[in-house]
Image (cartoon, grey):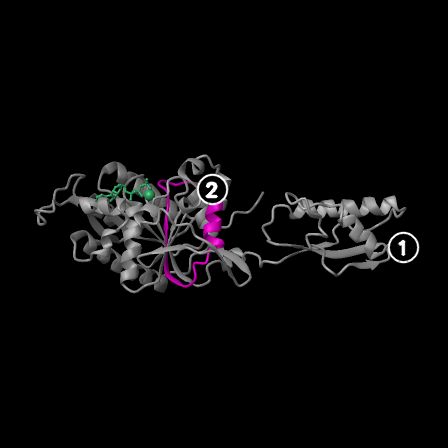
Amino acid sequence: MAIYPKLIMDALEKVRYPGTGKNLVEMGMVEDNIRIDGNKVSFSLLFEKPTDPFIKSVVKSAEAAIITHAAELGEKGIDIKGNIEVRTRQAARPEPDKLLPEVKNIIAVSSGKGGVGKSTVAANLAVALTMQGYKVGLLDADIFGPSQPKMFHLEEARPYMEEVNGRELIQPAENYGVKVLSIGFFVNKEDAVLWRGAMASNALKQLIADANWGDLDYFLIDLPPGTSDIHLTMVQTLAITGAIVVSTPQEVALADARKGISMFLGEKINVPVLGLVENMAWFTPAELPENKYYIFGKEGGKRLAEELNIPLLGQIPIVQSICEGGDNGKPVALNPDSITGAAFQALAENVVDQIEYRNEHLDPTRRVVVSKK
Ligand SMILES: Nc1ncnc2c1ncn2[C@@H]1O[C@H](COP(=O)(O)OP(=O)(O)OP(=O)(O)O)[C@@H](O)[C@H]1O
Ligand SMILES: [Mg+2]
């Protein structure tokens, strides 16, 4: 018996695409390129997205349906396994080393200890850099405790998808000239804390690879505290130009900052440390701007930077306005005439200088590649 195209189409009419109740022919997924060469049959199935979770199972079902249908008609030796080509309407995600082609510098903002002001520093640094004329994006990588939606007064933002070069990409939200993405835009806090490691790291990869970040001078990443799976995902996904470590002056915070710094500098990760930011360096009451009270100890961050021979990028005082700025979604850096606004503007200048120095003197960072066992 000869094999003919209608036999193939009849078989494929018996295969449903999951969740739709429609078969592959009705869905328009069978391309018009059925080739029959003796017993060998080949053709293409068209899927919407390269990330479609059903690709494998649909291809398997299609193969099985063709084999079964042919057997019913007395044709036993049909050669179809591995001959169905998968095509997708949307282009695939670029290769790992080709992500974010228009982003010039990627900066991780990190700390050892929690609550020392990473997110505050990341938000204000982003705003200060924008005010200095740079194009800036900020990724909130704190999947379990996102804070940038609030800091940027974007709690209500729901980024939409846009087609760019054949791919559906997430359009980052934007405020004060900074492009922002956070898992907080997509899921509520209660749901995210239940995520397992792989889910969190996939979500994070999507916010990087499937978003339209476009052309940026600086792409800042606000990391969760400590050294977590998220850190590992980041260094595996992106070649980070440099890391900024935030610490308060207390001994406990400094000890953790030291650990954070050695993680980046370690042989396996190998991300240059641009420097340390000493946050909550002293307290200054608004009515006595000349007075400095070293409530967490004096210049602990400065000493650590000297000891480790890394730059001290900035010292940010404790001021009520910083906290309020975070809470009401107006980063203090927007007001460069205030003490704190000026401190963040100076920090931004130092970061720009350090990045320039780093790019002149060191080779580009390499993404961490972990071989699969
Ligand atoms: N220099 C400062 N002066 C006053 N308040 C500050 C200062 N820096 C940070 N804060 C406040 O301290 C709190 C913690 O800051 P933030 O959320 O930035 O820390 P974090 O290191 O990102 O925390 P987490 O580890 O939870 O991510 C916030 O309420 C913030 O407004
Ligand atoms: Mg934070």
Judging from the image, what secondary structure is the residue with disc 2 in? helix
Residue at point 39%, 41% (across, down): 227
Asked if disc 1 and disc 2 are in contact, CB closer than 8 Å, the reply is no
State which quarter of the image contains the C terminus: top right
Is residue 96 positioned above or below 120 on the image? below
- Of residue 205 and residue 183, the one placed in the foreground of this image is 183
Q: Position of residue 152 (x, y in %)?
A: 31, 50
Query: What residue does disc 2 label?
Result: 200
Residue 353's tag is: none
Crowd tier of the residue under label 2, counting other residues whose Cα lies within 10 Å: few below 14, some 14–19, many 20 or above? many
Amino acid type indicated by mark 1: Ala
The answer to if 209 sits in the magenta stretch is yes
Q: Position of residue 133 (x, y in %)?
A: 29, 65
Q: Position of residue 29 (x, y in %)?
A: 69, 54
- Of residue 107 and residue 205, the one placed in the foreground of this image is 205
- Left or right position of 142 against 369: left
Is residue 155 positioned above or below 161 on the image? above
Read off the magenta span: 203-228
Residue 2's tag is: 1
The answer for how far apart the CA atoms under marks 1 and 2 are is 52 Å
